[in-house]
Image: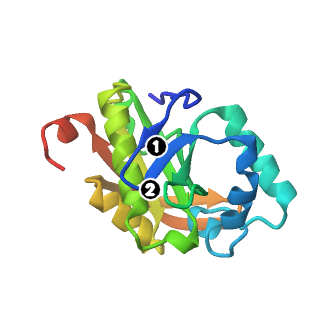
Amino acid sequence: MNVRIDVRSIKLETERLILRPFEENDLKDFNEYAKVEGVGEMAGWPHHKSMYESKRILDKFIAEHHTFALVHKETKKVIGSLGLEEYNEEHFKDYENQRGLELGYVLSKDFWGQGLMPEAVHRVIEFLFEEKNVDFITCGHFIRNSQSRRVIEKNGFQFVCEGVFNGKLGQFEDREYILRKEDYLNGKI
């Protein structure tokens, strides 16, 4: 079953990042990476065309309380997001009596290839399994998105199935993965 985690009072840290709830004063940083062509498209949404569009989505992040802002410690800028989303229950029917959610993430193109997203995902996995008693976490990527595939694999997720994602930009072939708490705790990752 899908669980909701409210991130309003949560602050997580890694060596290079702070994960915290989005704030209204993050708008400039958010727009800066969300308007770059190719960033949103890797996650299934069109890059932002205006500050207004970024404000509308930022307001949604703030109101829904399930998306972390990724703050780069060195620059003090918001450089991405990591959402605790609902997973596709059709793809994970064997887990209907367990607590789960899906991770979704995006990172500023300026920071691609530096290992920041695997670092952030790893910290969120620790938090969800060790502090929030989640039984499993799912994650997916479009087949064409090899960067997300590497993040998923580096964090020990296991392939489950291929499917089709219907999003704002059309249909995309995707892959779904799972990480179970028992595998995490038994050191299988």
Mark 1 lies on residue: 102
Q: Horizontal and vertical percent for residue 56?
A: 81, 48
Residue at horizontal 33%, vertical 49%?
122
Mark 2 lies on residue: 140
Residue at horizontal 81%, vertical 50%?
55
Answer with mark 2 or mark 1, whichever residue precedes in sequence: 1
Q: Horizontal and vertical percent for residue 63?
A: 72, 33
Marks 1 and 2: in contact by CB < 8 Å? yes
Which element carries disc 1, helix, strand or loop? strand
Q: In the depicted view, which residue is nearer to us: 15 or 87? A: 15
Q: Horizontal and vertical percent for residue 123?
A: 36, 44
- Category of crowding for the residue at label 2, using alpha-carbon neighbours closer than 10 angstroms: few (below 14), some (14–19), many (at least 20): many
Amino acid type shown at disc 2: Gly
Q: In the depicted view, which residue is nearer to us: 94 or 14? A: 14
- Category of crowding for the residue at label 1, using alpha-carbon neighbours closer than 10 angstroms: few (below 14), some (14–19), many (at least 20): many
Lateral position of residue 73 relative to residue 31, left or right: left
Q: CA distance from mark 2 to mark 1?
A: 8 Å
Relative to 15, residue 37 above or below = below
Which element carries disc 2, helix, strand or loop? strand
Coloration of the structure image: rainbow
Q: In the depicted view, which residue is nearer to us: 43 or 54? A: 54
